[in-house]
Amino acid sequence: MTADVPREAAASRATDRPGDPSPFALGLLLRQAHWRAATVMTEALRPLGIELRHFAVLIVLVNRGPTVQRDLAAATGSDKAGIMRVVDDLERKGLAVRKAVPGDRRVRAVEITPQGVELFDAAHVAAEPLAERLVADLGPGEREQLRDLLTRFAYPAGGEA
């Protein structure tokens, strides 16, 4: 099928190399950037005894307060079974608790504990020097520019997330 198309007219093959003109290049670069950032943040969280999946739930709980598991799953991109395992882990570590939701005996809201808040704050302190390492090669003003561009990309003005 592609044998009739001259080699130079064929679509660019997607790679994750810098400068790739493929229409997939942006997604591939974002994936590579995510892996790099996740690796660094995993390193920061390891001494605290949690993983990124745990921290993602703690972020939601700090931002929203007590949250039902269904909403935690949606907010973290997890599935029902996955979020149950994470909440089980957090409960076991004393970082979160499940509490009954008034008016619905079947539903439980997850709430961060004072120990969870302490760990959340400690994670930020531990991550600071490692986060600095992530952007060490950026020039003056580029860190802020990168944050602004990624924010606008992740949260478009039209709400097309």
Image (cartoon, helix red, strand yellow):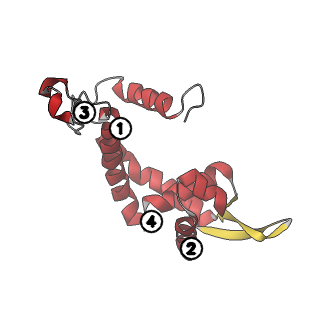
Tell me the quadrant of the picture where the C terminus can be found. Answer: top right
Label 3 crowd (10 A; few <14 / some 14-19 / many >=20):
few
Per the image, label 3 sits on a secondary structure element best described as loop
Q: Is residue 66 above or below residue 12?
A: below
Q: Are marks 1 and 2 in contact (CB under 8 Å)?
A: no
Q: Are marks 2 and 4 in contact (CB under 8 Å)?
A: no
Question: Residue 97, located in which quarter of the rendered image?
Answer: bottom right
Q: Are marks 4 and 1 in contact (CB under 8 Å)?
A: no
Query: Which amino acid, mark 2?
Result: Asp
Q: Earlier in the sequence, mark 1 or mark 2?
A: 1
Per the image, label 2 sits on a secondary structure element best described as helix
Give residue 142's position: percent from left, percent from top: 34, 25
Residue at 46%, 27% in the rendered image: 148
Residue nearest the observer in this picture, 68 or 97: 68
Tell me the quadrant of the picture where the N terminus can be found. Answer: top left
Give residue 160's position: percent from left, percent from top: 56, 32
Q: Earlier in the sequence, mark 2 or mark 4?
A: 4
Residue at 68%, 70% in the rendered image: 98
Alpha carbon distance from label 1 to label 2: 33 Å
Q: Earlier in the sequence, mark 3 or mark 1?
A: 1
Residue at 21%, 32% in the rendered image: 18
* Residue at the left extreme of this rendering: 7
Q: Which mark is residue 50?
A: 4
Q: Is residue 127 above or below residue 105?
A: above
Query: Which amino acid, mark 1?
Result: Gly
Alpha carbon distance from label 3 to label 1: 21 Å
**Residue identified by numbered label 1:** 27
**Residue identified by numbered label 3:** 137
**Residue identified by numbered label 2:** 88
Query: Which amino acid, mark 3?
Result: Asp
Residue nearest the observer in this picture, 65 or 34: 34
